[in-house]
Amino acid sequence: MPEPTYYERVYEVVRKIPKGRVSTYGAIADFLALGSARMVGWALHQSLQSNDVPAHRVVNRKGELSGRNHFGHPGLMQALLESEGVEIQHNTVCAFKQLFWHPAVLVTDVS
DNA sequence: TGTTTGACCACGG
DNA sequence: GCCGTGGCCAAAC
């Protein structure tokens, strides 16, 4: 049945995102070297109802919580991130550049 | 079955 | 540093 779809890849990558870290659609798309960032958004949308994927750790290139509106309730995404120690301001990840995590990078501590 | 949209990004001007 | 355009694949209409 279900062949390895682009979504499955995205799910895997997103699951690998360490807690307290955030990634971007472009980074995932670039890591998979397939499709485009748009598909990542679609995949995450599907993942919300299909898999346990920390989609709240995925934000757009600007570090903005673009999909906060899709979490069922606006603010939920921010709450989850803050719960993980990620500071959010104006629907944007503070020190996003610092918390930015790339799938190709091994899990390392920032401290 | 074809068109349109979609949680976007990179590049060029 | 901002604006416009292209691209990419899949699902919904």
Image (tube, coloured by chain):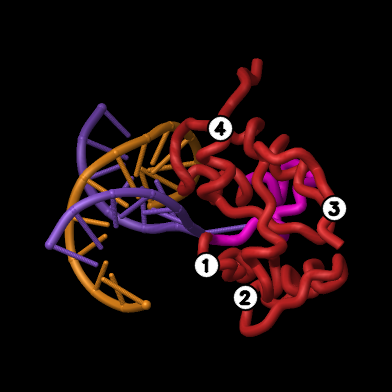
Chain colours: A red, B purple, C orange
SS for callout 3: loop
Discs 3 and 4 lie in a common subunit = yes
Q: Earlier in the sequence, mark 3 or mark 4?
A: 4
Residue at the spot 64% in from the left edge and 31% down from the top edge: A9
Q: Is residue A37 magenta?
A: no
In three-dimensional space, the C-alpha distance between marks 4 and 2, rounded to whole angstroms, equals 25 Å
Residue A7 pos. (x, y %): 60, 35
Q: Which mark is residue A109?
A: 3
Using the image, determine if residue A73 lies above or below residue A11: below
CA separation in Å, label 2 and label 3: 22 Å
The answer to whether the residues at label 3 and label 4 have Cβ atoms under 8 Å apart is no
Quadrant housing the N terminus of chain A: top right
Labels 3 and 1 touching (C-beta < 8 A): no
The alpha-carbon separation of the residues under discs 2 and 1 comes to: 8 Å
Q: Which residue, given by chain and number where applicable, does mark 2 sit on?
A: A92
* Mark sitting earlier along the chain (3/1): 1
User: Given contact means CB atoms under 8 Å apart, are the residues at marks 2 and 1 in contact?
Assistant: yes
Q: Are marks 2 and 3 on the same chain?
A: yes
Q: Which residue is mark 1?
A: A62
**Of marks 2 and 3, the one in the foreground:** 3
**Which residue occupies 71% across, 62% down?**
A99
